[in-house]
Amino acid sequence: MSYPTLAFDDTEIPASVVREWALKAASGLAALGVAEGDVVAVMMRNEPEAVVAILAAGHLGAYWCGLN
């Protein structure tokens, strides 16, 4: 999986940091029982953490569903 560099406000978050965060989040989702084929609902502001949640779900083979 490829991880992007994120730009938010005046901050740039390197791809290596995004990858680290996404893998930690994926570990947390897996500990909650999320597995391949599951759907993860993401209700967050349009901030880097939302991208990390989406990448974490994808890392596990889960689908994400954005909620407004």
Image (tube, helix red, strand yellow):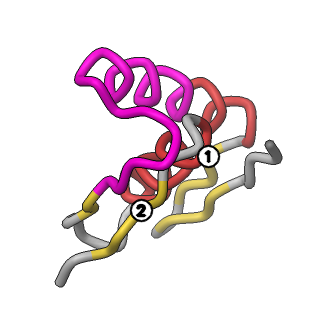
In the displayed image of the protein, which residue is found farthest to the front? 37
Q: Residue at x 52, y 39 (%)?
A: 36
Q: Is residue 5 above or below residue 42?
A: above
Q: Three-letter amino acid code at disc 2? A: Trp
Instruction: Name, please, the residue furthest toward the right.
Output: 2
Task: Please report the bounds of the magenta region as a residue range.
Answer: 21-40
- Residue marked by disc 2: 64
In the displayed structure image, the side of residue 10 where residue 28 appears, left or right: left
Q: CA–CA distance between discs 1 and 2?
A: 22 Å
Sequence order check, earlier mark of 1 and 2: 1
Picture coordinates of residue 44 (x, y %)?
22, 64
Residue at the image point whose x is 72% and y is 53% from the top: 5
Residue 39 position, x and y percent, is 35, 56
Q: Position of residue 32 (x, y in %)?
A: 23, 23
Secondary structure beneath dot 1 equals: strand
Please indicate whether residue 22 sits to the left or right of residue 3 in the image: left
Residue under label 1, please give it.
13
**Picture mark count:** 2
- Which of the 4 quarters of the picture holds residue 45? bottom left
Q: Position of residue 47 (x, y in %)?
A: 37, 64
Q: Nearer the viewer, mark 1 or mark 2?
A: 2
Residue at the spot x=35%, y=70% of the render?
Answer: 65
Disc 1 vs disc 2: Cβ atoms closer than 8 Å? no
Q: Residues within 10 Å of mark 1 (few under 14, many from 20)?
A: few
Quick one: quadrant of the N terminus?
top right
Check the image and report above or below for 41 versus 38.
Answer: below
Q: Is residue 33 left or right of residue 12?
A: left
Q: Amino acid at mark 1?
A: Ile
